[in-house]
Image (tube, helix red, strand yellow):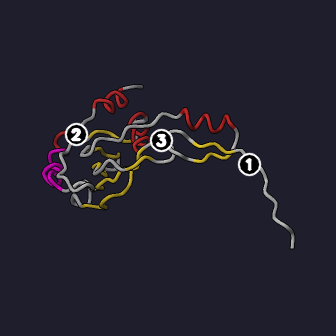
Amino acid sequence: MGKLRPIPIEAYKCSKCDLIIEGTYEQAQKHVDTLIDRPLPVGFVYTTSSNIVYIVAGKGERDLNHGHLQPAIVHSLNLGGRLLEVYRHINSKKIREDFRKKRVSFLHPNRFKRVKLRYEGEKSADGKPLKLKRTVPSLEKLASSK
């Protein structure tokens, strides 16, 4: 049986998220240069084109791509307004990108009222009552940009 020999590897530690990055300095620097995203506000409500509603239910934690994985309540406006899932994790960076690319949108005010009646005051991931929000100024800018 052959002997094991150590081999040198090039690795760097991200100063923002403590990720160990194996590869070149340039690859590591590209990761470090990635901006850290802010979490979406707890209580923010948005929808997909297929009438699936997401309610951000907690701040979550930072992921390895400098976004935030946040718990969300998932609700269908179809299927009689049924709750589909409690605390599916969403990625704040991906949601911002989805707003920019118009894959998700703000809930229509009338639909927001119905969702608010159903979920306002429900417990968030940290146990506090949810206060639902239909819009977020930073996402309004993304949604209105071309």
At 28% from the left edge and 39% from the top edge, which residue is drawn? 106
Residue 130, percent across and down?
A: 19, 50
**Residues packed near mark 2 inside 10 Å, few (<14), some (14 to 19) or many (20 plus):** some
* Measured Cα–Cα span from mark 3 to mark 1: 24 Å
Q: How many marks are shown on the rendered structure? A: 3
Please state which of residues 143 and 62 is positioned toward the viewer in this rendering: 62
CB under 8 Å between callouts 2 and 1? Answer: no
Residue 42, percent across and down?
A: 26, 45
At 46% from the left edge and 48% from the top edge, which residue is drawn? 63
Residue 89, percent across and down?
A: 38, 54
Residue labelled with disc 1: 9
At 29% from the left edge and 55% from the top edge, which residue is drawn? 73
Q: Earlier in the sequence, mark 3 or mark 2?
A: 3
Residue 44 against residue 100 in the figure, above or below: below
Please state which of residues 134 and 4 is positioned toward the viewer in this rendering: 4
13 relative position to 62: left or right: right
* Measured Cα–Cα span from mark 3 to mark 2: 25 Å
Mark 3: amino acid: His
CB under 8 Å between callouts 3 and 2? Answer: no
Magenta residue check for 34: no
**Residues packed near mark 1 inside 10 Å, few (<14), some (14 to 19) or many (20 plus):** few
Give the mark toward the camera: 3 or 1.
1
Badge 2 element? loop
Range of residues picked out in magenta: 112-122
Residue labelled with disc 3: 66
123 relative position to 106: left or right: left
Give the mark toward the camera: 3 or 2.
3
Magenta residue check for 116: yes
Mark 2: amino acid: Arg
Extreme residue toward the bottom, this view: 1
